[in-house]
Image (spheres, rainbow, N blue to C red):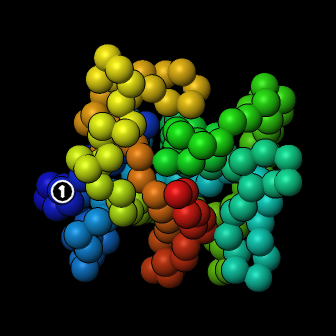
Amino acid sequence: MINKSKFSAPSHLSKYVCYMHSPYFQDLIDIEWRGQIQSSTQSKQFKIKYYGELYDEYQLICATDFAPELIYAVDIESNEEILLFDGAQHGYDPMFCDEFTPEQLTQRPVIHQFIDQDQQDIFEVIIKVYHNIDYDEEMESLSNTAGEIELISGKIISADQLKADGFDFIQINVMNSLGHEYSIFERELA
């Protein structure tokens, strides 16, 4: 199975996604990209570790008052760590609006492990991102005088990378061994 979305995977995830498990890709909407995470060894079983706080009522990972969240999937066989989301660099707001101090970027220990409502800690991971911004229309206002897209950090990216990485909403879902799917992270980014 191939990517059914008109959008490419976010660049930080592109080498870690697959589209093989068709039930994960039902009802894809026009502004959505969706992918299942797999490690370099093709494993699809992960533990989730993160910097942030857990919003207990909904069991969602959130930023702290000090800094944005960091979320990793850790392959249970190889211990390979895959960065799923960094609130300081992924999506529209950190690309164009939000600036962070060096302390906010470096003082985020990834020490928490996610355990779901069923007390499970090994998951398959599905990421969904949504693109409500029409970058073809916005390209002129986002480009500098040389036609380059300069991010708030000073980094220069291509128009194609902007279209993949400039998403305005992300959701991370996990499927446990009992067959229960839970959303563990959701964030609006524009």
The residue singled out by tag 1 in the image is 6
* Quadrant in the rendering for residue 42: top left
For residue 63, above or below residue 78: below
Please state the horizontal and vertical placement of residue 57, each as a whole percent of the image.
76, 82
Residue 38, can we see it?
A: no
Q: Looking at the image, which is closer to me, 10 or 146?
A: 146
Question: Which quadrant holds the N terminus?
Answer: bottom left
For residue 134, above or below residue 57: above
Please state the horizontal and vertical placement of residue 136, each as a whole percent of the image.
23, 47
Secondary structure beneath dot 1 equals loop
For the point 63% across and 46% down, the residue is 87
Q: Looking at the image, which is closer to me, 43 or 186?
A: 186
- Badge 1 crowding class, 10 Å Cα cut-off, few under 14, some 14 to 19, many 20 or more, is few
Please state the horizontal and vertical placement of residue 155, each as a whole percent of the image.
49, 22
For the point 83% across and 29% down, the residue is 103
Q: How many marks?
A: 1
Q: Looking at the image, which is closer to me, 120 or 114?
A: 114
Please state the horizontal and vertical placement of residue 20, each as a whole percent of the image.
22, 60
Left or right of 170 on screen, residue 42:
left
For the point 55% across and 73% down, the residue is 183
